Amino acid sequence: MRPIRLCLQIVNRRWRASVPLAGLLLLGCGGGGNDNAVDSAIATVDTQADLALAASLYRDSARTPAGFYVEPQAYPDRLSILFHVQQQDIGITALQGAVCSDDFAQALSWSSAAATARGYTTQLASTTTSDWFYQFDRSVNDNADLLIINRVYRCSAFAPADSRSAEFGVINRSPMSADALRFLAEYHWQFSQFNNSLHAVVSSSGRADQGAFEHELMRAHLVRGAGAGGCDRVSLWRWGWALARDTGVVRESQTFERSFDARNEAGSVSLCGG
């Protein structure tokens, strides 16, 4: 039975591997293999993947994996500020978080109020209605190179919860789907604190059971000088999302996975410790 257990260990580590695993899978699942050789192969895969991940974080060259949601760039020649209208933008202090509406006129009014609340005098340039939100593109009166883009969720698609709540919000689109949850998870990442340098999403994957759709972003964060001996610390976290099929309620969670130390000396990246 031991070769089967080893095979599962390798498969469970596949999200960490940036090198082909076909040969390792054969080694782990074959009959009568050398256990020490398999354990060594697993360690090699982890080391190579960790090194590649650390190098990517230092370069800040790719924060998301292939196929991850990419925000369209409608104005590549202009500086734009994109945000969802928040409760406090429109004078609601009892609640925290994004707003939603199915009334276009109300959403338009909120868009103008939100721009003003953030210190911008703007004129409406264009509007867009998507499956999830209303978008308002606003030119800034005293800065021709700057564009304010703000959005209001459509309640019929997604109703955000108070940000202090245990819930993230409610998906109201029917039928419930794994694709809807994946969009919400990947879309929300771009508005989070994790869409910054020294952060990356390693993988984005989902699964479904009878009661819920689930999606997980495996994210990495490098903190300079936080490791042993002056090295930098790379921490990996599971950012979990769950969508209840019966209610549409979405919950999220952050679970620490593991960490390792690395250093970058004059562009040469290496792992610290044994």
Image (cartoon, rainbow, N blue to C red):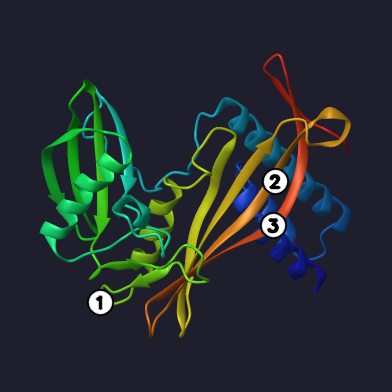
**Residue type marked 2:** Ser
**Residue type marked 1:** Ser
Toward the top, the furthest residue is: 266
Looking at the rendering, which quadrant does residue 220 occupy?
A: top right
Pick the front one: 95 or 200: 95
- Looking at the figure, which quarter contains the N terminus? bottom right
Find the distance from the CA under tag 2 to the CA under tag 3: 8 Å
| Residue position for label 3 | 256
| Residue position for label 2 | 235
Sequence-wise first label, 1 or 3: 1
Find the distance from the CA under tag 1 to the CA under tag 3: 33 Å
Give the image location of residue 249, x and y in percent.
41, 76
Give the image location of residue 134, x and y in percent.
19, 54
Drawn side of residue 114 relative to residue 1, left or right: left
| Residue position for label 1 | 174
Give the image location of residue 91, x and y in percent.
32, 55
Drawn side of residue 9 relative to residue 176, left or right: right
User: Vertically, is 245 above or below 223?
Assistant: below
**Decide: marks 2, 3 in contact (CB < 8 A)?**
yes
